[in-house]
Image (cartoon, grey):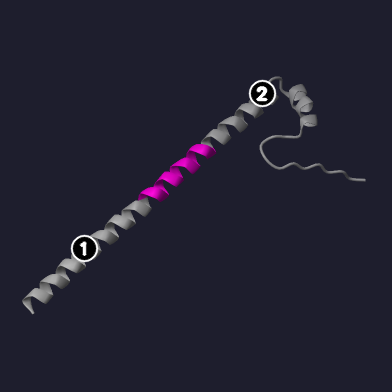
Amino acid sequence: MVSQTMFSGPLPPPALYAHYEDVLPGAAERILALTEREQAHRHRFETDALHAEVRYSNLGMWLGAGVLTFVLIAACFCAYIG
């Protein structure tokens, strides 16, 4: 009989923490610190991506308004000169 246990994510199931500590003292604390650093990195990345998306959206609106203004001025000038 073959048995296989799998888990997903950076945190192992609580039952495995004792085994990590037996092999390497302090390993459980290091795993938790790694998970906390990864979560902080992911939050920073998502915040930066959100700010970039807002910046590009605003840039698009300002460029669109500038092009519209230019077209309206050009149309008025063409109407003026006939």
The residue under the point 26% across, 60% down is: 65
The residue under the point 15% across, 69% down is: 74
Residue 47 horizontal/vertical position (percent): 47, 41
Which stretch appears magenta? 42-55
Residue 72 horizontal/vertical position (percent): 19, 68
Q: Is residue 45 magenta?
A: yes
Query: How crowded is the residue under tag 1: few (<14 C-alpha within 10 Å), some, or many (20+)?
Result: few
Image quadrant holding the C terminus, namely: bottom left
Q: Looking at the image, is 59 positioned above or below residue 28?
A: below
Foreground residue among 75 and 43: 75
- Quarter-of-image position of residue 80: bottom left
Q: Secondary structure at mark 1?
A: helix
Where is mark 1, residue-wise?
69
Where is mark 2, residue-wise?
29
**Distance CA(mark 2)–CA(mark 1):** 60 Å
Mark before the other along the chain sequence, 2 or 1: 2
Main SS category, magenta section: helix
Return the residue found at the far left: 81
Foreground residue among 60 and 81: 81
The image's mark for residue 39 is none
Foreground residue among 65 and 43: 65
Return the residue found at the far bottom: 82
Q: Amino acid at mark 2?
A: Glu
Query: How crowded is the residue under tag 2: few (<14 C-alpha within 10 Å), some, or many (20+)?
Result: few
Q: How many marks?
A: 2
The residue under the point 78% across, 25% down is: 18
Residue 26 horizontal/vertical position (percent): 68, 20
Q: Amino acid at mark 1?
A: Thr
Q: Looking at the image, is 48 positioned above or below residue 56?
A: above
Left or right, 10 with reference to 61? right
Q: Is residue 21 magenta?
A: no
